[in-house]
Amino acid sequence: MDYARVLSVNVGEPRPIEASVGVTGIDKRPASGPVPVTVPGPSRSGLAGDAICDVANHGGPDQAVYAYAREDLDTWAAELGRELPAGVFGENLTTSGVDTTGALIGERWLVGTTLLEVSCPRIPCRTFAVWLEQERWQHTFTQRALPGAYLRVLTPGAITAGDSIDIVHRPDHNVTIGVVFRALTLEPELLPRLVDIDALSGKFRDRARKRVNA
């Protein structure tokens, strides 16, 4: 099967890790059966039963659903020399056949009965590094620039493992998840490309505008 699809739908419960981090919802596990997906309020996940603990960096309408490609997990697994099961990066959707780094901001995915829109990349945080127990993980993840894609919910529905991912709209620009990630991290010369992309998460668009106008 080589069509674009969801391999796993993952949700997490709060759990304590290193004391400096406290409680986190990054440990996401595959759910059985359909998972309802809605437009979340601030600091909440779009998936039913999925915990958001780091409310400063995760959750809310522009970060309702986090998708990461199985192909990219396999790249990391080879590099790190360890198995990386679905959900280990804190992703809600482990996908196959979709280039999440190459997804355009504002691109729309019909997944199950849910319509999603690509909104911004994941920026690595300390919790991510502590969870994976990898030294300099934030640096390593940033250098590789395979961030995965956050999506907002345009039409609530439900998603089940095995659902196809149909790209039903691609906007008329070339600003991808990868471009936004590199602009915000290693390549600030790309920042001017972000300021007029309306579908980009507001906090990242505002950050780009401030840095361009500084």
Image (spheres, helix red, strand yellow):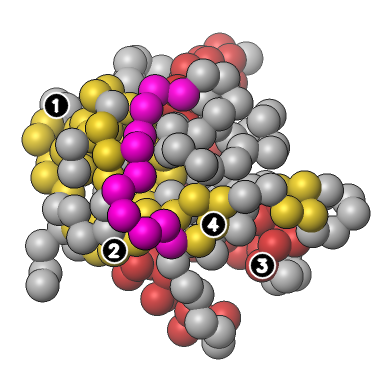
Q: Residue furthest front?
A: 33
Give the magenta-colored segment's residue range: 30-40
Look at the numbered discs 2 and 1 and tell me whether their residues touch, using CB distance below 8 Å.
no
* Cα–Cα gap, marks 3 and 1: 37 Å
User: In this view of the protein, which residue sits in the foreground, 154 or 200?
Assistant: 154
Q: Which mark is residue 132?
A: 3
User: In this view of the protein, which residue sits in the foreground, 12 or 130?
Assistant: 12
Location of residue 166 in the rendering, given as x and y in whole percent from the top left corner = 12, 45
* Cα–Cα gap, marks 2 and 4: 14 Å
Which is more foreground, mark 3 or mark 1?
3
Which of disc 1 and disc 3 is earlier in sequence? 3
Look at the numbered discs 2 and 3 and tell me whether their residues touch, using CB distance below 8 Å.
no
Residue, x 70% and y 71% (percent of image)?
Answer: 134
* Cα–Cα gap, marks 4 and 1: 34 Å
Asked whether residue 146 is in view, the answer is: no
Which of disc 4 and disc 3 is earlier in sequence? 4
